[in-house]
Image (cartoon, rainbow, N blue to C red):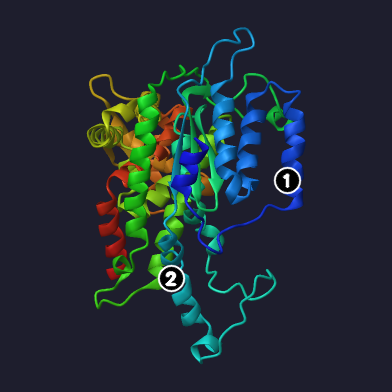
């Protein structure tokens, strides 16, 4: 396997190699020593991840090959002959060197636009010293994920949360996906860290561990990689960010890069908040706001169970059938949870699925449960600034929704973020149209 990995990786481009420092290597060695006395899967996976990160480029194929064989040979304590990871596999996703330049294009343009000395022809002194001029660094830390790809593969790795099915091994050329071929519990039932004694709570229901066909894992990585390629093609195309006169707008380009990376990062944060329903819900509201910028659809549309179901149906047609059990496991639960929100309206009429909304002027109107649930979630989103509407013609609706709902929101509803992220990936041409319309407005 090491030879195969070496052939795929090839020779790293000049200037891309980053050598690990002594502190990082010492940390890996210390973890390796602890691993000899540990039977914890998390310790093994952390050691594999850190070893891959700090390994020199020439050693990466051997490191990954050794890690792969170690995972495949793992057995159970009570059944050493069992091989739960016999279907494990390795996938390599590399960054095209051209992306490095294309993603920096708006930063270069903005430096010329905002640096008066550079505009006058005085070249800046750019050095490796962090205290020196950083060069073309506009918002770089907010959209650097495209360089190592880990951020963009994060939602894929977390799509079965609270279960884990793969391990991401980032390198400066891209990311290695160590697919386990099965799903493992990503959390413990007992407290493992002192911070877990704080009063934060996750889902109140037990989810059945998904049983994966190895082809689902292979197919999902392949589909995801292909769709990221299409996404990056849109995000790094300067022509997308031109006004009606054909002039390139670097600010619009930068906004799109920042917004898209924010979407991926916050979906991953939702997936990592399996123990904290409050945190995952606030992150979902942020994701829904971000999606409005990328899709042109308001939060009420994305919070409609009918629309969410139609989106799920579209994805079932767009995704390879073999990937459904992996990629659509979370979205299916999210759509079911969204429908469940409607059951919280306890003053609905028995004759129809509607509730009464009292308007600001004292008049009344009826609202069906799907629309009411979507608007109720919008009320909760607005309440991140504090409860109570200060908008004209919205106070009556807000008060009516709060008065008639029991406030129960299933934890699984946060999976809507991943549902609509899949939809963005599956429809990159729609994203192109939306981003172009922002620039030409």
Residue 27 location, quadrant: top right
On the question of residue 252 being in view, the answer is: yes
Rendered position, 299 above or below 184: below
Q: Position of residue 284 (x, y in %)?
A: 46, 41
Q: Which residue is mark 2?
A: 106
In the image, 44: left or right of 386? right
* Mark toward the viewer: 2 or 1: 1
**Callout 1: 10 Å neighbours few (<14), some, many (20+)?**
some
Spot occupied by residue 51 in the image (x, y as percentages of width and height): 65, 40
Q: Residue 34 bears which disc, if any? A: none
**Relative side of 295 to 172, left or right:** left
Question: Which type of secondary structure does the marked residue at label 1 adopt?
Answer: helix
Vertical order, 355 against 151 (above or below): above
* Quadrant of the rendered image containing residue 306: top left
Most extreme residue toward the front is 3
- Answer whether residue 186 is visible to the viewer in this image: no
Tell me what residue is drawn at x 76 percent, y 51 percent.
22
Q: Residue at x 23, y 36 (%)?
A: 314
Q: Is residue 47 above or below residue 391?
A: above
Q: Nearer the viewer, residue 61 or 273?
A: 61
Question: Callout 2: few (<14), some (14-19), or many (20+) C-alpha neighbours within 10 Å?
Answer: many
x 37%, y 34%: residue: 220
* Local secondary structure at mark 2: helix
Quadrant assignment for the C terminus: bottom left
- Residue at the farthest bottom position: 120
Q: What x and y, as percent, mark residue 143?
A: 50, 58
Sooner in the amino-acid sequence: mark 2 or mark 1: 1
* Residue 25: mark in rendering: 1
Q: Residue at x 33, y 35 (%)?
A: 372
Q: Circles 2 and 1: CB distance less than 8 Å?
A: no
Expressed as whole percent of the image width and height from the top left, the position of residue 16 reads 55, 60
Instruction: State the residue in front, 326 or 295.
Output: 326
């Amino acid at each position: 396997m090491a030879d195969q990995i070496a052939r795929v990786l090839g020779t790293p481009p000049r200037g891309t190699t980053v050598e690990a420092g002594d502190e990082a290597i010492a940390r890996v060695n210390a973890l390796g020593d602890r691993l000899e006395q540990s039977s914890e899967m998390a310790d093994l996976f952390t050691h594999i991840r850190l070893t891959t990160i700090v390994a020199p480029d020439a050693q990466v194929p051997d490191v990954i090959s050794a890690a792969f064989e170690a995972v495949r040979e793992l057995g159970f304590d009570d059944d050493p002959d069992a091989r739960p990871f016999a279907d494990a596999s390795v996938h390599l996703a590399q960054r095209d060197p051209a992306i490095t330049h294309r993603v920096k294009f708006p930063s270069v343009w903005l430096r010329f636009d905002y640096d008066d000395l550079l505009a006058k022809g005085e070249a800046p002194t750019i050095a490796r010293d962090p205290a020196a001029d950083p060069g073309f660094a506009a918002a770089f830390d907010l959209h650097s994920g495209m360089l190592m790809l880990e951020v963009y593969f994060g939602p894929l790795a977390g799509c079965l949360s609270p279960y884990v099915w793969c391990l991401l091994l980032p390198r400066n050329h891209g990311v290695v996906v160590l697919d386990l071929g099965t799903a493992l519990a990503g959390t413990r039932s007992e407290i493992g860290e002192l911070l877990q004694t704080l009063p934060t709570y996750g889902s109140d229901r037990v989810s059945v561990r998904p049983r994966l066909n190895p082809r689902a894992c292979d197919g999902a990585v392949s589909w995801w990689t292909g769709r990221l390629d299409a996404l990056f093609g849109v995000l790094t195309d300067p022509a997308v960010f031109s006004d009606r006169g054909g002039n390139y707008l670097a600010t619009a380009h930068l906004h799109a890069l920042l917004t898209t990376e924010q979407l991926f990062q916050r979906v991953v944060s939702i997936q990592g908040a399996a123990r904290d329903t409050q945190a995952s819900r606030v992150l979902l509201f942020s994701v829904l706001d971000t999606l409005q910028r990328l899709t042109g659809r308001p939060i009420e549309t994305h919070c409609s169970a009918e629309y969410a179901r139609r989106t799920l149906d579209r994805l079932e047609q767009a995704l390879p059938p073999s990937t459904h059990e992996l990629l659509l496991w979370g979205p299916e639960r999210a759509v079911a949870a969204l429908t469940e929100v409607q059951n919280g309206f306890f003053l609905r009429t028995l004759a129809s699925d509607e509730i009464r909304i009292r308007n600001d002027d004292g008049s009344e109107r009826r609202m069906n449960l799907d629309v009411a649930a979507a608007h109720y979630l919008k009320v909760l989103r607005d309440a991140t600034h504090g409860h109570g509407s200060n908008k004209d013609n919205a106070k009556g609706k807000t008060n009516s929704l709060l008065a008639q709902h029991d406030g129960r929101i299933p934890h699984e509803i946060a999976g809507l973020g991943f549902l609509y992220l899949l939809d963005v990936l599956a429809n990159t041409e729609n994203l192109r149209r939306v981003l172009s319309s922002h620039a030409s407005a």
